[in-house]
Amino acid sequence: MDGILNINKPSGKTSYSIVALVKRLTGEKRVGHAGTLDPLASGVLPVCLGQATRLVEYLMPATKTYLAEIELGITTDTFDMEGKVMTRRDFSAVTPEKIAAVLPEFCGRIAQKPPVYSALKQQGQPLYKLARAGVNVEVKSRPVNIESITLKDWHAPVLTLEVVCGKGTYIRSLANDIGEDLGCGGALRNLTRTRVGIFHYAAAVTPEQLQQACAAGYWENLLYPLDSIIEDWQTAVVSGETAKNIVNGVPVALAAGTAPGYARAYGTDGLLLAVMRYDMEKQLWQPEKVFRSLTPPDLCGTNNSRACCGGCEDKCPQALGAGT
């Protein structure tokens, strides 16, 4: 079964535990998630099944939206409320005006230092394991892109922000840094991811709803199509020699054009055949991932300019007398 489930991960569960649950309920062995959520966080977790797992890398860079509650006047070693309290400071001088003045500093392409307690690796070991072992870890800043930060609510000491950002952004780090800029410190109290690309919170299903769907035998209806996460790419429909070359990994010319980037190639049956990447040097489209073999209509072509290959019965336009 190939497709993507839009799961609403509850707080307190790991992303891995949701993947394990999907495997158990659906019986699909190839399952993976796109974008880890901390156990404290809840919300949208796209889970890819079957051949959709091969498209995870194209979903990872998708724009994400978070609703973050930050408690001011406190700092912790993990940058959230699950960590050890490091400092407590007065937050009484913070006003909505001061918050609004600080937020633009964190928008755009910025350098962000990830939390020490994170899954990022150093010398092959996750940082959180080194930190728990008492190893002094030096975390380097890295560039992230934050499209916007909107103040949604302020009830001292808690401010609620909507953050729209790109891949690799740590909202825990953002909470800590905003708190420091306000002069009182801050830690993430609650986090909900409301969007990952085309997947929205309102349409996400809970683990309980997935269990019910599996028990009733309609869980496949919850799957988003394999190619839904690349639906904004250039598109080409191929057949004949072009289709054969793509399946064999041979670069081809496509009607998709010559714009740098990626395209999706379909067979004449409307199913995704391959992901294509444009090679600027060769000025051809290189098959990057092939998803299936050819059907008889793909082999014969849809323009009916080739002789029928035979054996296609009623599947081929030429066998139906559409022309030769």
Image: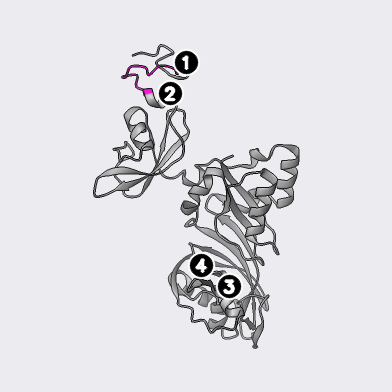
In this rendering, the answer to whether 207 lies above or below 250 is: below
Q: Secondary structure at mark 4?
A: loop
The location of residue 92, given as percent across then percent down, is 65, 85
Residue topped by disc 4: 169
Q: Residue at x 45, y 76 (%)?
A: 141
Quadrant of residue 171 within the rendered picture: bottom right
Q: Secondary structure at mark 3?
A: helix
The location of residue 188, given as percent across then percent down, is 63, 73
Magenta region, residue range: 300-311
Q: Residue at x 58, y 62 (%)?
A: 66
Residue topped by disc 2: 296
In this rendering, the answer to whether 263 lies above or below 103 is: above
Q: Residue at x 56, y 41 (%)?
A: 2
Disc 3 to disc 2, C-alpha distance: 53 Å
Callout 4, which amino acid? Thr
Residue 313 disc label = 1
